[in-house]
Amino acid sequence: MEKVHIERNTVQETLVIPLYARKLCTEQYPKLFQDKKAVELMERMDYDFSPHAKKGKGLAYRFGALETAMRQYDIAWEVRDYLKAHPEAAVVNLGCGLDMTGENCDNGQCKIYNLDLPDVIALRERLLPGTERVRNLAVDLNDTGWFDQIDDSAGAVFFAAGVFYYFQAEQVKSLFSRMAERFPGGRLVFDAAGKTAVKVMIKTWVKSLGITDIGAWFYVDDPARDVQPWIPKAKVSARGYMRGYNDLKDPAVSGFFRFLSWLADGMMKMRIIRIDF
């Protein structure tokens, strides 16, 4: 099979980092996370993964992989929970990259939509082409015309992993309020962090854009205060990002990593937020 070449220093390369993290998670935390498709995708790429393999031996990289594992574990839990009551619902991956969470939650009846920018979807189509029940849609999430491409007649569960950190608060507010109006009975699940954590995560690229006001970017210190007022008729709930769905007492997770997870959920206010419209 012909391999797909991945150019360095491109948007395509940024998709490789979470892909390798998911592969590392599958190897290191097999009881918490499984994404065998990530390994298969890597084998189909013309790309040198050795720098990531080298970094993967480091403590920070391995904890980042654990964060990736728990985020996907949490989001998949919420998607499957929604599908129990709405088995034929639309499962919508917002800012999908090369993520396979929707497909991993497939119950054989739901409709799966993977949404991202055109260049990302072009690569996804080469590696993960759509099927009868899986559609890859090239859209700008802020242009809500994509709403009309989602068949929500049997319900809809939307999720975003590592996406809204790169949105300004006003953009998120507009998107959430429009989704609440258009998809009553639907569910949105996403990861968020407090102001301190977001400042650390995005300080480099925000500075490169000449932006100094971190307050313009989306963060959640208090879901009831920062999100609920935008969608007063919806129900907003939250759990800890790292330990809200799993106690992490798996033998593969060290005591030190459990301590870091406690800090992440506490001081950094990392959460999985669920909105039931």
Image: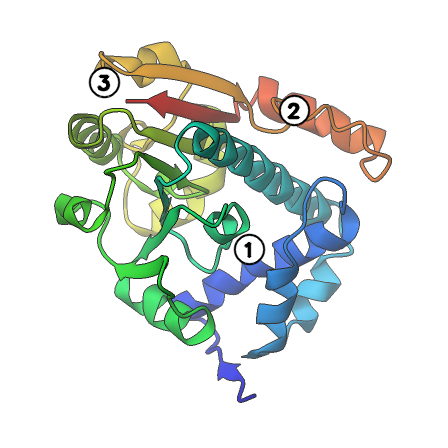
Q: What's the CA distance linking mark 3 and mark 1?
A: 31 Å
Instruction: Please tell me whether mark 1 sits on a helix, a strand or a loop.
Output: helix
Q: How many other residues sit within 10 Å of disc 1, few (<14), some (14-19) or many (≥20)? A: some
Question: What residue sits 41% from the left and 31% below the top?
Answer: 189
Q: Nearer the viewer, mark 3 or mark 1?
A: 3
Check disc 3 and give the amino acid type.
Ile
Q: Quadrant of the C terminus?
A: top left
Dot 2 amino acid type:
Arg
> x, y (%) of residue 56?
72, 57
Kindly identify the residue that appears in the image at 41 percent across and 13 percent down.
222
Name the element at disc 2.
loop
Residue at left offset 31%, top offset 68%: 119
Q: Which mark is residue 18?
A: 1
Give the structural element (helix, strand or loop) at label 3.
loop
Amino acid type, label 1? Pro
Q: Which residue is mark 3?
A: 231
> Which of the pair 220/185 is nearer the observer?
185
Q: Quadrant of residue 252?
A: top right
Q: Residue 157's x, y, as percent?
A: 36, 36
The residue nearer to you, when weighing 260 against 157, is 157
Q: Which residue is mark 2?
A: 243
Task: Decide: few, some or many residues near mark 2? Use Cα within 10 Å; few <14, some 14-19, many ≥20.
Answer: some
Front residue of 48 and 89: 89
Give the left or right position of residue 160, taking residue 260 as reference: left
- Which residue in the rendered view is the most extreme toward the right? 251
The number of callouts visible is 3
The residue under the point 60% across, 62% down is 37
Q: Which of the two labelled residues, at mark 2 and mark 1, occupies the earlier sequence position?
A: 1
Vertical arrangement, residue 150 with respect to residue 192, above or below: below
Hey, which quadrant is residue 263 in on the image?
top right
**Position of residue 103 in the picture relative to residue 62 (left or right):** left
- Quadrant in which the N terminus appears: bottom right
